[in-house]
Amino acid sequence: MEGRDVVSGGRKLAGGLAVLVALFGLGAVAKTAALTRWDIAFDEELAERRNSALTWLAKAATDVSQTSVGVALALLIPLVLWVLRRRRDAVRVLLAFAGALTLTLVAKVTVGEHRPPARLWIEAPDNADSFPSGHTTIAAALALALILVVRGRARALVAVLGVLLTAGVAFARMYLGVHYLPDVAGGVLSAVSALLLTLGVLELRPGKAREAAAASS
């Protein structure tokens, strides 16, 4: 059993690293002139289809996925799981959330992609770096965390709702004119990479020892 856990952990770790490489590769491609022209044209197309109802929904999606909400969820969900004596899940969710937020911050600073033109903004972004989308990262991290911890038949429903939430937030950020398509894709990659790296490290022998020690304390 322990040997299988190590193999599974190694595969997840490799998968997480592969997604991480894809994240930074996408960031490099996102800055090319050809893709930037296409991205601007796509955001302009969305801007032409704006209406008051969609604008309200897009702003609401942004509000529920801002950084303060992400930090609160990263602390609250593990706390609830810890109280419920699901300490292994609490550790995994905490590290996955923290990893996703950290990867997004590092990618923003490293890639340094500029925001779409200000003429497309409905509301001003909270920072100057566009790639990856922090709001989409938070939505995807929440979706993945819930899929990870929800058990039984409800997991399929949670997965569908998680995909809809992530897609809704991604669309909202482009609709509001503050992100390009690669930015929101990068947000999803950040969350996926962080989760796979977390699970991979914790399923390797040293990681499992640390996790077991935390769960028994």
Image: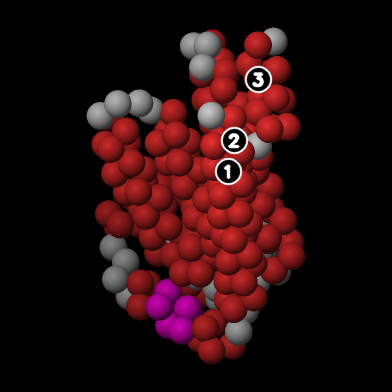
Question: In the image, which is nearer the foreground, mark 3 or mark 1?
Answer: 1
Residue 175 shown left or right of residue 183 in the figure: left
Report the amino acid beneath label 3: Ala
Of the numbered discs in the image, which one, if any, rests on residue 7?
Answer: 1
Label pair 1/2, CB-CB below 8 angstroms: yes
State the residue position of label 2: 3
Of the numbered discs in the image, which one, if any, rests on residue 212?
Answer: 3
SS at circle 3: helix
Which image quadrant: the C terminus? top right
Q: CA distance from mark 2 to mark 3?
A: 17 Å
In the rendered view, would you say 17 is above or below 199? below
* Residue 3 sits in quarter: top right
Which region is colored magenta? Answer: 38-44
Q: Residue at x 68, y 60 (%)?
A: 107
Coordinates of residue 209 in the picture (x, y in percent): 70, 25
Q: Earlier in the sequence, mark 3 or mark 1?
A: 1
Q: Residue at x 68, y 18 (%)?
A: 214
